[in-house]
């Protein structure tokens, strides 16, 4: 939501004078909290790691679960919080449209247009807005996979319940470690019906660490769509959370129609923030009233808002603005390091970890060794040991991991910009000692 719309922008645009009582002059920013982090040097990985307040005694392989924020983001959150506490009408100094600033920054990172981005609180919220808002015609159906997370499966179930559409699931691989890009694309193609409207997939599976060849899937669907009416075109909808911030691909490289991701995981942005990017907004209806300019103009003039846009899909209401407005610094932090460098670092460490784990006799590596079919998630099974037990025992050795929330569960690691090669070797040694 852009808070100034009902206080400043609408008034300035000559809308209704009744909003004048809500106008206010922004309060100057409170100086940022003093940080213990050294001056940021994006070229030095040790310095990048030092920007985080993570416990240095622990090797953090679960930082993606609810990611920590680097110093610049933490300081920005503190500054905005102090400003809002001092004056509830506070806006970031020099920025009368902070949500638009976020959109522009996110768009630059994604290689997209600012108007294509809705602001959300999480990946799940984005997927909920998408699947619950899609308009389906009678006879259209939905295709998803056996490997997707609750947010996708439940999202398309609710879509089917609302529209009566049939939902089908396909299996993309039997053995994730031996997954094949060609087989993945073929399985999706074979699962399509003549009127499949939604293809719901996940970029990087949190269950196995398999990274889907989204571009190849998009290219296949583009061929399928050539013979279809525009209203029957299959839309490629992607849960991107475990690729977003870990991989360098923008939306042009992915070729999908919608991408939902939290920015509080691999991007290491503020908690409770996310984006939903789309290029086919006319295919869905907003679910929650928006608080941005089009919504206010329509409400105040008594007219319908018009065609669906990302702004209209962005849920209105007052947010934890100190977190939302710090998204800009999170994108800037990643851009300063370089998306390509982040991806190389993430995958090099993941490969090092996978090579180490698969050399341990009592460990079964589940994630593909190939960087072409994986990102930063690494999943494995320890013979004779439940994953939760392994997590507990590894934490005793100061190695922080997680389990996958699937049946059956697996032991899961995540290599990222807060991981070092030495910590990878330490983790491999700790797993080797599990009995």
Image: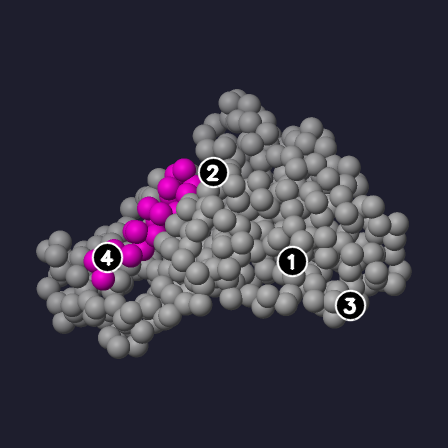
* Residue at point 65%, 58% (across, down): 61
Q: Position of residue 99 (x, y in %)?
A: 31, 55
Q: Nearer the viewer, mark 3 or mark 4?
A: 3
Q: Position of residue 352 (x, y in %)?
A: 70, 45
Name the residue carrying label 1.
61
Range of residues picked out in magenta: 93-112
Residue 75 is drawn in which quadrant?
Answer: bottom left
337 shown above or below 185: below
Q: Position of residue 183 (x, y in %)?
A: 72, 31
* Residue at point 26%, 77% (across, down): 86
Name the residue carrying label 2.
250
Point out which mark residue 393 bears: 3
Name the residue carrying label 4.
95
Query: Alpha carbon of mark 2 to alpha carbon of mark 1: how far?
Result: 25 Å
Q: Residues within 10 Å of mark 1 (few under 14, many from 20)?
A: many
Q: Residues within 10 Å of mark 4 (few under 14, many from 20)?
A: few
**In this view, which residue lies farthest toward the bottom?**
86
Quadrant in which the N terminus appears = bottom left
Q: Position of residue 336 (x, y in %)?
A: 41, 46
């Amino acid at each position: 939501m852009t808070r100034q719309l009902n206080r400043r922008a609408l008034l300035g645009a000559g809308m209704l004078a009744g909003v004048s009582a809500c106008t206010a002059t922004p309060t100057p920013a409170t100086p940022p909290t003093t940080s213990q982090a050294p001056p940021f040097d994006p070229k030095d990985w040790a310095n990048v790691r030092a920007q985080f307040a993570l416990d240095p005694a622990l090797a953090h392989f679960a930082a993606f679960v609810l990611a920590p924020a680097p110093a610049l983001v933490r300081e920005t959150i503190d500054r905005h919080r102090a400003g809002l506490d001092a004056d509830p009408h506070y806006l970031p100094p020099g920025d009368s449209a902070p949500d638009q600033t976020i959109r522009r920054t996110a768009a630059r990172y994604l290689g997209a247009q600012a108007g294509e981005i809705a602001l959300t609180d999480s990946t799940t919220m984005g997927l909920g807005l998408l699947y619950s808002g899609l308009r389906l015609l009678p006879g259209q159906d939905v295709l998803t996979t056996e490997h997707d997370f609750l947010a996708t499966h439940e999202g398309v179930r609710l879509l089917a319940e609302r529209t009566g559409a049939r939902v089908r699931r396909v299996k993309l691989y039997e053995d994730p470690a031996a997954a094949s890009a060609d087989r993945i694309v073929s399985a999706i193609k074979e699962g399509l019906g003549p009127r499949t409207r939604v293809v719901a997939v996940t970029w990087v599976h949190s269950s196995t660490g398999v990274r889907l060849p989204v571009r190849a899937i998009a290219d296949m669907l583009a061929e399928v769509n050539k013979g279809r009416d525009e209203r029957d075109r299959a839309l490629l909808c992607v849960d991107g959370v475990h690729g977003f911030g870990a991989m360098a691909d923008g939306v042009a490289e992915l070729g999908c129609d919608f991408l939902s991701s939290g920015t509080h995981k691999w991007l290491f942005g503020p908690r409770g923030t996310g984006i939903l990017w789309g290029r086919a907004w006319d295919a869905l209806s907003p679910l929650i009233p928006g608080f941005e300019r089009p919504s206010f103009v329509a409400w105040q003039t008594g007219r319908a808002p018009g065609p669906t846009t990302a702004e209209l899909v962005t849920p209105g209401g007052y947010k934890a603005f100190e977190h939302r407005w710090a998204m800009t610094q999170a994108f800037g932090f990643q851009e300063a390091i370089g998306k390509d460098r982040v991806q190389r670092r993430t995958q090099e460490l993941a490969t090092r970890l996978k090579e180490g784990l698969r050399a341990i006799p009592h460990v079964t590596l589940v994630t593909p060794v190939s960087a072409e079919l994986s990102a930063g998630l690494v999943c494995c099974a320890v013979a004779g040991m439940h994953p939760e037990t392994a997590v507990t025992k590894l934490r005793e050795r100061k190695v922080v991991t997680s389990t996958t929330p699937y049946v059956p569960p697996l032991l899961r690691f995540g290599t990222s910009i807060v991981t070092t090669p030495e910590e990878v070797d330490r983790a491999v040694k700790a797993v080797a000692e599990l009995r």
